[in-house]
Image: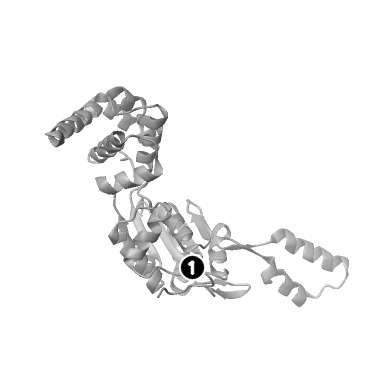
Amino acid sequence: MTATAGPGLSLPASVDDVVTRLAGQDYVCDRRLATALYLSLTLKRPLFLEGEPGVGKTELAKALAAMLGTTLLRVQCYEGLDVAQTAYEWNVARQMVEIRLAEAAHTVDHDRILHSLYSREMLIERPLLQALTQTRSPVLLIDELDRADEPFDAFLLEVLAENQITIPELGTIRAAAPPFTLITSNRTREIHDALKRRCLYHWVEFPDVERELQIVRLKAPGASERLYRQVVEFVQRMRTLDLFKAPGVAETIDWTNALVALNSMQLDPASVNDTLGVLLKYQDDIVRMQGGDTAKLLDELRARALLDAA
């Protein structure tokens, strides 16, 4: 029997159920990640996901919301992010109108006006507060937390530990249906230990060849089986090079779609060099590949294919 989390919303019954239901949303999930997600949902603990960019951390939150049939609320982190952008702010324009109406009526009751100015109706809800006021548990994605300033980590502690937000002028708002929270980080800075202690943790690795093949077949239809395998094996080998930014799964998908659009049936030096800007995002990496690494990797692929054929 599955546990419930709000009207019409049911949780997976097992780790295998997580894998199966995510597959129904075209998300190919390995068993370790599925286990971490199952425990997060079952124990009602936030799940903190770290890993290289492009390994599917954000996509997992989207797939989870679709799998559960619930709302996805997203906080996209960046430098300078504060409470007003993420949790709540007061509707200043409406507050000014309230003050002017009271002055025009010549019935200025300071206590009544103060209560009115800081009532719930004057509050503009942002994603963190919205996540606590839903009637059924949403998926809350706090994306790329490492891009936000460190003080934002401290602000999140109350939300993650207690599923509540304290608003000084109004009081504490607690979640009736606590959100399923996923936090992602690309590890450009260390996240505060106090925040990590409130979460389950999982490092999302690059997929192996077979799982990446599954992903690319789903997300980039139209290529030949030969091209799928060549693309994935080429990218897998690229990740072993000392590049400034190794291509993620998202880039593998984009590259496959680009090659299909160019009617490429297989990899060759010309098609690879002409499309490296789809796969790599730094000029130094592109120059390195064009300087000899492309030919080297293609030779390795040909040698591997001959060995397999023998």
Q: Is residue 298 above or below residue 81?
A: above
Could you say which quadrant of the image residue 134 lies in?
bottom right
Residue 40: give x, y in percent of width and height. Answer: 38, 68
- Name the side, left or right, on which 195 lies relative to 173: left
Residue 210: give x, y in percent of width and height. Answer: 26, 47
Q: Helix or strand or loop: what does disc 1 sit on?
A: loop
* Residue pointed to by mark 1: 179
Q: How is the image coloured?
A: one colour
Q: Is residue 26 above or below residue 217?
A: below
- Residue at 44 percent of width and 59 percent of height: 64
| Residue 199 can be seen, yes or no | no
Q: Residue furthest right?
A: 105
Q: Quadrant of the N terminus?
A: bottom left
Residue sitting nearer the eye, 240 or 208 = 208
Q: Residue furthest left?
A: 310
Q: How many marks?
A: 1
Amino acid type at circle 1 is: Pro
Q: Residue furthest top?
A: 270
Residue sitting nearer the eye, 180 or 169 = 180
Q: Residues within 10 Å of mark 1 (few under 14, many from 20)?
A: many
Q: Quadrant of the C terminus?
A: top left
Residue 155: give x, y in percent of width and height. Answer: 48, 65
Residue sitting nearer the eye, 102 or 266 = 266
- Residue at 72 percent of width and 74 percent of height: 115
Residue sitting nearer the eye, 121 or 177 = 177
Q: Is residue 162 above or below residue 145?
A: below
- Residue at 38 percent of width and 45 percent of height: 218
- Name the side, left or right, on which 86 lies relative to 256: right
Residue 294: give x, y in percent of width and height. Answer: 25, 28
Could you say which quadrant of the image residue 127 lies in?
bottom right
